[in-house]
Amino acid sequence: QVQLVESGGGLVQAGGSLRLSCAASGRTFSNYAMGWFRQAPGKEREFVVAISRSGGTTNYADSVKGRFTISRDNAKNTVYLQMNSLKSEDTAVYYCAARALYSSASSSRADYNYWGQGTQVTVSS
């Protein structure tokens, strides 16, 4: 089992930037593909971005392409989400997720086995 803890959320003006971090513990971090999802009030949790175990493959939702960047540091057991040019519609709770057994950067919630508690991102317009 792996434990995930997100940090870095907060309040930012539209057009601003935030960097989220997700620290993993419990198992070998490099064995897991990682993903970020988000959930706005009254909406379903949606895929944002994912990264393969090695970091060599990434997969972005169309809504964040060109603005968000995912990266991972397997030596630090951490995955990052750099968010630039933030919009009000990016307001949500952001969740980090880990996918065991398979290396690919899946966009499906069902493929992820472990989830963090989430961190709130609020973008004011």
Image: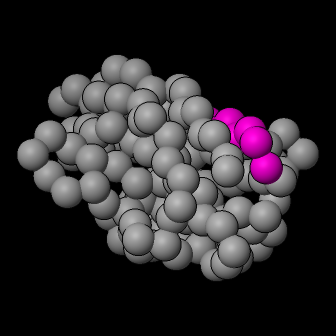
Q: Is residue 110 visible?
A: yes
Q: Quadrant of the C terminus?
A: top left
Left or right placement of residue 55 versus residue 7 in this view: right
Q: Is residue 1 magenta?
A: no
Residue found at x 28% / y 31%: 123
Residue drawn at 14 percent across, 52 percent down: 43
Residue at 59% x, 57% y is: 98
- Asked if residue 94 lies left or right of residue 103, the reply is left
Residue 71 image point, x, y percent: 69, 54
Left or right relative to 22: residue 65: left
Q: Left or right: 35 with respect to 52?
A: left
In the image, residue 46 sits, relative to residue 41, either above or below, namely below
Q: How many marks?
A: 0
The front one of 109 and 36 is 109
Q: Point out the stretch of residues depicted in magenta.
A: 21-27
Outermost residue, front side = 1
Q: Is residue 121 above or below residue 70?
A: above
Q: Residue at x 83, y 53 (%)?
A: 28
